[in-house]
Image (cartoon, rainbow, N blue to C red):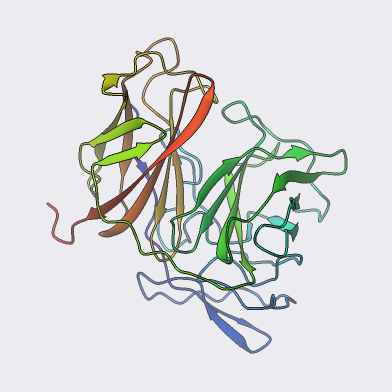
Amino acid sequence: MKPPARLSLFVVALAALFGVAFAIGSASGLDLTPAPTPTHEAEGGHGDGATDDDATGTGHDDAETGHDDGGSHGNGSHGGELPAGVVVSADGYTLSDLAVPQAAGERGAITFRILGPDGHAVTDYETQHEKDLHLVVVSQDTTEFFHEHPVMAADGTWSVDWTWPRAGSYRVYADVLPAGAEQGLTLAQDVTVPGDVVVEALPEESRVAEVDGYTVSLAGDLTTSGGVVTLSVAHDGADVTDLDPYLGAYGHLVAIRVGDLAYLHVHPEGEVGTVPAGPDIEFSVAAPSPGTYRLFLDFSHGGEVRTAAFTVVVGAHEH
């Protein structure tokens, strides 16, 4: 079994950019001050966390994300470094030129580029789980979750058809491994979709999720000491034992920490063909700290991908 995938503790960072201070997140109280870089604010401002530039601009933040561990993407780094999913730039790579539809319900596209250390768009990537780039979008209240796979043009511009479901703040994550990079990266920007914003209440903690007639049950505890959590899939009361392979696995688990929206993409124990195709999907994972987390399980059955969502609370006095 692989060692637990760990998302490192989030660190508060105050960045002085032309005299405008903003909070990247809150956990430890450690101050980090990146080098100033020209930026401009998006209309309507940003949600907590990831970026210091607008939905169509470019930001630069020299804080690094961490090393991959135990088959995960976007694993947070150790020590005083920032976790994955909270910076627009890492290791010389930048999520740039992000453009999105400007209103809820408006059909359009998400487009962006990944710039390399030389300032040019990256066009060569290492494939991770059958795709060169995984795009994840999460609303600030964590009730909206999307996992998509854009197409890259010859000039390095990625694009995917897109319609925002409702107004509000969202974080856009690009999960990639550029060719020649030392490690996988999760770069992120916040965008604001104008309109009448309704913030949904955080769903209560639950061990069972229902989606399209499927029941997904969570067994095992997400803890700071690590361990195995098992997601079991049933349909109409019967165990599902013929899950489809999806991106080289029988399931993919994304963990988002409520508040700072730090990110971890975890892959299951065992390879397709070496473990049963359901009903159980096992993941080795550990929480970096006590708090509330949202877990999103992508699984495919009958040729259709579905997502089961859970709210999990990690206790403050674990042993």
Residue at image point 74% right, 65% down: 58
Q: Judge by depth and name the residue closer to the eye, 154 or 89.
A: 154
Location of residue 229 (image quadrant) = top left
The mark tally for this picture is 0
Compared with 305, 186 (above or below) is: below
Location of residue 236 (image quadrant) = top left
Residue at image point 38% right, 15% down: 277
* Quadrant of image for the N terminus: top left
Residue 99 % position (x, y): 75, 59
Farthest residue toward the bottom?
A: 19
Q: Judge by depth and name the residue closer to the eye, 246 or 300.
A: 300
Q: Is residue 104 left or right of residue 220?
A: right
Whether residue 183 appears in this view of the structure is no
Compared with 184, 287 (above or below) is: below
Farthest residue toward the top?
A: 273
Q: Is residue 12 left or right of residue 3?
A: right
Q: Judge by depth and name the residue closer to the eye, 109 or 314.
A: 109
Q: Judge by depth and name the residue closer to the eye, 215 or 170.
A: 215
Whether residue 156 appears in this view of the structure is yes
Compared with 256, 124 (above or below) is: above
Location of residue 102 (image quadrant) = bottom right
Compared with 219, 311 (above or below) is: below
Residue 183 % position (x, y): 58, 42
Residue 204 % position (x, y): 27, 56
